Image: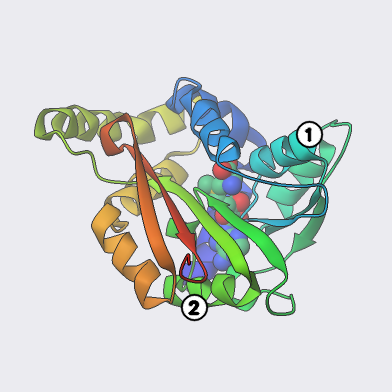
Amino acid sequence: MKKKFVNRVFSSVSMKYDFMNDLMSIGMHRIWKEKVISLLEISQDSLVLDLASGSGDISMKIQEKFNCKCIALDANMEMLEIAKKKLYSSQPFYIYGNAETLPFKKTIFDYVIVSFGLRNFNDIPKSLEQINRVLKKTGTFICLEFSEVNSPFFRKILKTYFKAIPKLGLLFANNKFAYEYLVESILNFPNQIQLTKKLTQAGFKNVKVIDIIDGVAAIHISKKNELS
Ligand SMILES: C[S@@+](CC[C@H](N)C(=O)[O-])C[C@H]1O[C@@H](n2cnc3c(N)ncnc32)[C@H](O)[C@@H]1O
């Protein structure tokens, strides 16, 4: 049910996805994604999975910076097509698939990165289990996602902004329903502490959290195995 609905949402926003991301975050999503890239310690032999790759922001930045082996996987064909059309010197390898049933052997990836994808997954615990399975023993999972703002004052301002988001969706993308879903999915997503708990329950270790703009978004970095 959720799977079909989410797929319909991303099919409907795909053409305007990049434009709306820039508009709604006043370009800040680019800085947040750069922050994720800056955390990576990658060699040319590394194998990286950009899961829920969407229009390819993360995987293309990785390819450009590290020229390693990078796979971009997404459950929506239209979003993959948008990514493929982008003219970058080096492209990742694209796969159409689902986070809940990753089509890879176990313990092969150095990094799995999910940027603004996790809250859309049909089954988050199952997806986390799959991510853990495909990571190497020394592997790292990085999740960039909307989270909970710490300051009550800022939280109020953000709540007002959230009310405007479907209106922006209607005005600039002729699509109110997709942006209503965006707000709903952000509000229903686990906060920093709750997500840390989910990661630990899925077997991840050494979970570290980096808040972005007081928690508007957060980066959760976790290891497959305990650091010795
Ligand atoms: C908000 S976009 C994020 C795209 C990109 N990672 C970014 O940061 O801009 C969420 C993406 O998750 C994908 N997605 C949703 N559910 C998925 C699933 N179960 N497995 C794989 N991808 C999924 C959607 O198709 C969509 O492209």
| Image quadrant where residue 62 sits | top right
The answer to whether the residue bearing label 2 lies less than 8 angstroms from the nearest atom of ligand 1 is no
Q: Is residue 172 left or right of residue 65?
A: left
Give the residue type at disc 2. Answer: Lys
Label 1 vs 2, first from the N-terminus: 1
Whether 21 is drawn above or below 8: the answer is above
Q: What element carries label 2?
A: helix
Q: Characterize the local packing of mark 2: few (<14), some (14-19) or many (20 or more) Cα atoms within 10 angstroms.
A: some
Quadrant hosting residue 179: top left
* Residue contact at pointers 1 and 2, CB within 8 angstroms: no
The answer to whether 120 is drawn above or below residue 151 in the figure is below
Where does ligand 1 appear, by image quarter? bottom right
**Residue 11 in the image: x percent, y percent?**
63, 51
Specify the label residue 126 is tagged with: 2
3 and 223: which is toward the camera: 223
Secondary element at image label 1: helix
Determine which residue is flagged by label 1: 64
Estimate the x, y position of residue 213 in percent, counting from the top left: 32, 29
Q: Mark 1, mark 2: which one is toward the viewer?
A: 1
Q: Which residue sits at x=28%, y=35%?
A: 162
